[in-house]
Image (tube, rainbow, N blue to C red):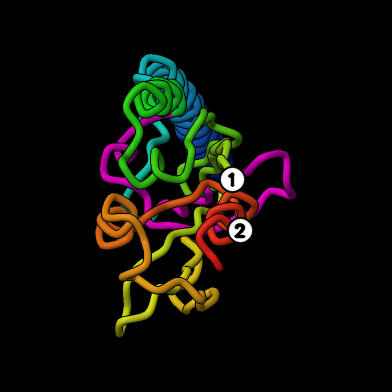
């Protein structure tokens, strides 16, 4: 009887050992399968990332781009000033902006032409801020003097001043007719010396 119990116990232990072995083997295989799946997923993800298109979005100017203008006039100290960015400089990348500046050089605004515009170039570029430099050659205006009849008196003015420059001792009726007509139509002199010579020649 004891012998049969021993055999039964042995069989039970053997069966338990076999079951444990089978469980452990399945568990190990399942773990390895999961690792292989994770590695495969990682490879697929890496391959997908490598095949994604590179972001080629251009850096372009917008209406919010800070527009700085450095004005250089006759070799004087440059003046840096912020202005509203022109609409024809918006939505451009650096290369396109360089071309746009070159086009502006060929056909500047009337305001720039009046100021003596010579050239323009792009100094720095960033979508948030660009700097351009404008060169001007300002021609110094010569002061012109002129005579006119005012309140029955002949007075002299300077072209750069709205106030009377000087009164004269000329008497309109004593001047030759052609000179009277010149003064009525406003007689001009290119410099102060020419004005004085004229006054002296008709002053008694």
User: Where is residue 99 drawn, in percent x and y?
Assistant: 39, 20
- How many neighbours does mark 2 have within 10 angstroms: few (below 14), some (14-19), or many (20 or more)? few
In front: 32, or 74? 74
Q: Residue at x 42, y 52 (%)?
A: 188
Number of the label disc, if any, that sits on residue 140: 1
Up the image or down, 25 lies above or below 160; here it is: above
Q: Is residue 96 left or right of residue 36?
A: left
User: Where is residue 59 drawn, in percent x and y?
Assistant: 42, 34
- Residue at the limit of the structure toward the bottom, as seen here: 151
- Numbered circles on residues, count: 2
Up the image or down, 121 lies above or below 133; here it is: above
In front: 200, or 91? 200
In front: 10, or 58? 58
Q: Check whether the beta carbons of the residues at disc 2 and disc 1 lie within 8 A of each other.
A: no
**81 in magenta:** yes
Classify the position of the C terminus by image quarter: bottom right
Mark before the other along the chain sequence, 2 or 1: 1
Number of the label disc, if any, that sits on residue 196: 2
The range drawn in magenta is 65-93
Number of the label disc, if any, that sits on residue 56: none
Up the image or down, 6 lies above or below 105; here it is: below
User: Where is residue 200 drawn, in percent x and y?
Assistant: 60, 60
Up the image or down, 48 lies above or below 60; here it is: above
């Amino acid at each position: 009887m004891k012998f049969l119990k021993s055999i039964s116990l042995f069989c039970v232990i053997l069966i338990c050992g076999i079951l444990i072995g089978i469980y452990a083997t399945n568990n190990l295989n399942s773990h390895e399968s999961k690792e292989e799946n994770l590695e495969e997923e990682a490879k697929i993800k890496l391959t997908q990332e490598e095949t994604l298109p590179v972001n080629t979005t251009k850096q372009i100017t917008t209406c919010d781009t800070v527009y700085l203008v450095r004005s250089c006039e006759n070799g004087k100290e440059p003046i840096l000033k912020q202005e509203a960015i022109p609409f024809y400089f918006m939505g451009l990348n650096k290369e396109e902006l360089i071309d746009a500046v070159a086009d502006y050089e060929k056909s500047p605004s009337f305001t720039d032409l009046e100021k003596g515009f010579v050239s323009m170039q792009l100094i720095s570029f960033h979508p948030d801020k660009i700097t351009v430099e404008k060169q001007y050659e300002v021609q110094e205006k010569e002061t012109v003097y002129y005579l006119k009849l005012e309140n029955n008196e002949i007075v002299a003015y300077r072209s750069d001043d709205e106030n009377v420059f000087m009164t004269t001792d000329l008497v309109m009726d004593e001047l030759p007719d052609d000179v009277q007509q010149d003064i009525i139509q406003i007689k001009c002199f290119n410099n102060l010396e020419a004005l004085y010579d004229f006054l002296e020649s008709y002053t008694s």
